[in-house]
Image (tube, rainbow, N blue to C red):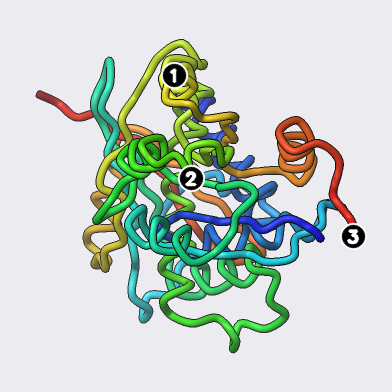
Amino acid sequence: MAYNVLIVDDSSVVRKVLIKTFGLTNIEVSNFIQAENGQVGLKQLSENWVDIIFLDINMPVMNGLEFIAHLKANKDLRDIPIVVVSTEGSKERQEDLMKYGVKAYLRKPVSPEDLAKTIRNILGEAKHE
Amino acid sequence: MSKFEHPLKKASLKVLEDWAMMLVEEVIEPGPDLFDPNAQFFMSSVNLKGPISGSVAIVAQLKFMQVLASNVLGQNSLEHVSSEDAEDAYREMGNILAGNFLTEAYGTDVSFDLLDPRVDAVSYADFGHFVDRNIVFEFQADDVPVAVSFSIKRE
């Protein structure tokens, strides 16, 4: 079984580009689940098993920080690793996000190499069954 | 030369070449001549708030937006690009450009908020005002004109 990946971003283009970037790595993904904001992301998590979450911060309805807070308050969801994908790149912001329990931070545009390295660092080598 | 010129140019080239996968040539004298006078202009803008406040903006026409979306989505034909994807890609380009510009200008030790990314239709006259802003670079990207700008907000 390959990974199930949840992508939470209000831009459909960003979600599609990230999926395309996965295709340029050798990371196997069995299912991409998409959500346009944190609220939809939580709904998707109630219906789908997910191995890792790629998350935007600035979103309408429920932003990334609110989504993280909901996740961390749920014992069934709080251990799912989160990777923030953002355009802003200050060390201060990255450190703040790590305090929220984010596992990694990727700057846009995301390269296939950085994406693959991040997945391997967090989840190890790709699973196969 | 303003300290923001080199970062803006470098970030613009990075976004156009690496993210949008376009062949880019700089236009020496920015202006409306390379644009289609009969086509609508669109501006993608992002406001910046931090040690300084300002905005990063891109001005282009629909053809650029379609080529941009087609490239980033890996589509073979402009016919398959929806207007929603074209606008979304254009808005996202503004976001990515702003973030990369700030990193080039200030490094990673300074935090900024990137606010209100949006795409608006603008007039030919608006484009003239755009060129009159502090810093403007114009490029031919895949033979389609696009202009980028950074302006500081005067309090």
In the displayed structure, does residue B97 sit left or right of residue A51?
Answer: left
Q: Residue at x 61, y 82 (%)?
A: B78
Q: Which residue is mark 1?
A: A99
Horizontal and vertical percent position of residue B79 = 59, 88
Q: Earlier in the sequence, mark 2 or mark 1?
A: 2
Residue B32 can be seen in this image: no
Q: Nearer the viewer, residue B28 or B57?
A: B57
Say whether mark 3 and mark 2 are on the same chain: yes
View extreme (bottom): residue: B79
Q: Which residue is mark 3?
A: A129
Q: Decide which of tag 3 and tag 1 comes sooner along the chain.
A: 1
Q: Position of residue A120 (x, y in %)?
A: 79, 36
Q: Return the x and y of residue B154 as percentages of the image width and height.
A: 14, 26
Q: Residue A96 or B91: which is nearer the viewer?
A: A96
Q: How far, Cα to Cα, is label 3 from label 1?
A: 34 Å
- Kindly state the secondary structure of the residue where label 3 is placed: loop
The subunit carrying tag 2 is A
Q: Which residue has dot 2 on it?
A: A76
User: Is A19 left, or right, of A129 in this rendering?
Assistant: left
